[in-house]
Image (cartoon, rainbow, N blue to C red):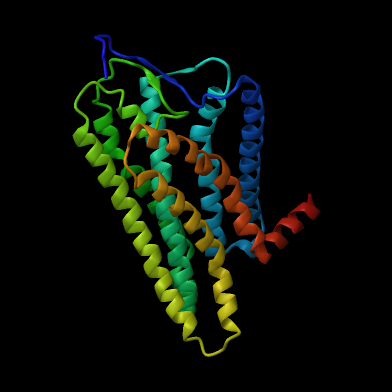
């Protein structure tokens, strides 16, 4: 790729190239979906905090997860909306790197939160007599904080290294946000070690978290299968169904996006697929949790009646 001698101080997000007649339609659809997701997740947080019947570890973690689902799309969706406007919009190099860091830190945090929620289900089903003691309020807060701190720390080393990369043109990022692959392709310094570091960091977070979740569900399944009464089995499966559905959606999308080569065609495909976790899942996940949970639905109706 040809480089010039001028250091780049601003990037332009290319986004999606669509017909002019579709730009405003897609803009309106994505904006409505984004606002809906923010409203739904914010409502879940408010209901869990105000309704005494939901002051339980499982719902505490759901509210933390909803808080994450408010901020995760907020990092990228504004860039997606801007890319659908007629003119390219600029973003400084520093803001672009910050957006990269926040996006992947929140993604790593989601991995850790799913592990914590799987552990909560493991304790509830496999250690029910010790559940209140093990998952006390302090432990829940520490687990949630640990997930957030771990998520941001896991990308810190990559952030330090990518901040040292020199960008000297071209300055058009082939994405609607500052993703790693299209961003690093614009660097004019050696980036092979950084690419390896990024893949190792992402791979370790994804694989380790997935294995911990899988291990939790192996123990859960084993406990359910040896339950003395058949009446307890459907209830136990029901308490895990929502979380397991979210896990399958999250890791299915993540695996497709990251466990693939980085050819030019793959970068374009990843740009399209990335719309799903950025736009759709923040709306889909709270719906999965609420529609399959009678306590949450009852609390929502009580809140609506009070209002």
Query: What residue lies at 50% left-to-right and 54% top-to-bottom?
Result: 249
Residue 220 rendering spot, x and y as whole percentages: 45, 75
Query: What residue lies at 65% left-to-right and 22% top-to-bottom?
Result: 21
Residue sitting nearer the eye, 174 or 207: 174
Residue 192 rendering spot, x and y as whole percentages: 20, 33
- The image quadrant of residue 279 is top right
Residue 230 rendering spot, x and y as whole percentages: 58, 86
- The image quadrant of residue 93 is top left
Residue 87 vs 164, above or below: the answer is above
Q: Count of labels shown?
A: 0
Residue sitting nearer the eye, 248 or 154: 248
Residue 25 rendering spot, x and y as whole percentages: 66, 28
In this image, 52 relative to 13: left or right?
A: right
Is any part of residue 138 visible from this angle?
no
Q: Quadrant of the N terminus?
A: top left
Q: Residue furthest front?
A: 265
Residue 221 vs 293, above or below: the answer is below
Query: What residue lies at 27% left-to-right and 9% top-to-bottom?
Result: 6
Is any part of residue 305 visible from this angle?
yes
In this image, 260 relative to 88: left or right?
A: left
Query: What residue lies at 61% left-to-right and 24% top-to-bottom?
Result: 23
In this image, 233 relative to 46: left or right?
A: left
Residue 229 vs 103, above or below: the answer is below
Residue sitting nearer the eye, 231 or 273: 273
Q: Residue furthest bottom?
A: 228
């Amino acid at each position: 790729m040809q480089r010039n001698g001028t250091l780049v101080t601003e990037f332009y997000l290319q986004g999606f190239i669509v017909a002019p007649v579709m730009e405003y339609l897609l803009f309106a659809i994505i904006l409505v979906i984004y606002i809906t997701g923010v409203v739904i997740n914010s409502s879940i947080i408010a209901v869990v905090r105000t309704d005494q019947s939901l002051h339980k570890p499982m719902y505490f973690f759901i509210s933390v997860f909803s808080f994450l689902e408010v901020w995760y799309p907020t990092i990228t969706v504004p860039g997606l909306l801007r890319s659908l406007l007629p003119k390219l919009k600029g973003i400084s190099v520093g803001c672009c790197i910050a957006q990269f860091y926040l996006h992947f830190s929140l993604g790593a945090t989601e991995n850790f939160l799913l592990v914590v929620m799987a552990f909560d289900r493991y304790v509830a089903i496999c250690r029910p007599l010790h559940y209140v003691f093990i998952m006390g309020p302090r432990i829940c807060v520490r687990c949630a904080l640990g997930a957030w701190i771990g998520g941001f720390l896991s990308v810190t080393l990559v952030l330090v290294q990518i901040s040292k990369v020199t960008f000297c043109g071209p300055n058009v990022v082939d994405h609607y946000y500052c993703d790693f692959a299209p961003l690093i392709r614009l660097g004019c310094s050696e980036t092979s070690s950084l690419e390896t570091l990024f893949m190792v960091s992402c791979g370790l977070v994804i694989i380790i978290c997935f294995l911990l979740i899988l291990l939790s569900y192996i123990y859960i399944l084993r406990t359910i299968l040896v339950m003395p009464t058949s009446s307890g089995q459907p209830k136990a499966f029901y308490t895990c169904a929502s979380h397991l559905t979210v896990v399958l959606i999250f890791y299915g999308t993540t695996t497709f996006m990251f466990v693939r080569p980085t050819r030019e065609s793959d970068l374009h495909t990843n740009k399209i697929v990335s719309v799903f976790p950025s736009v759709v899942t923040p709306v889909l996940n709270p719906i999965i949790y609420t529609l399959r949970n009678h306590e949450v639905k009852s609390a929502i109706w009580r809140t609506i009646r009070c209002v």
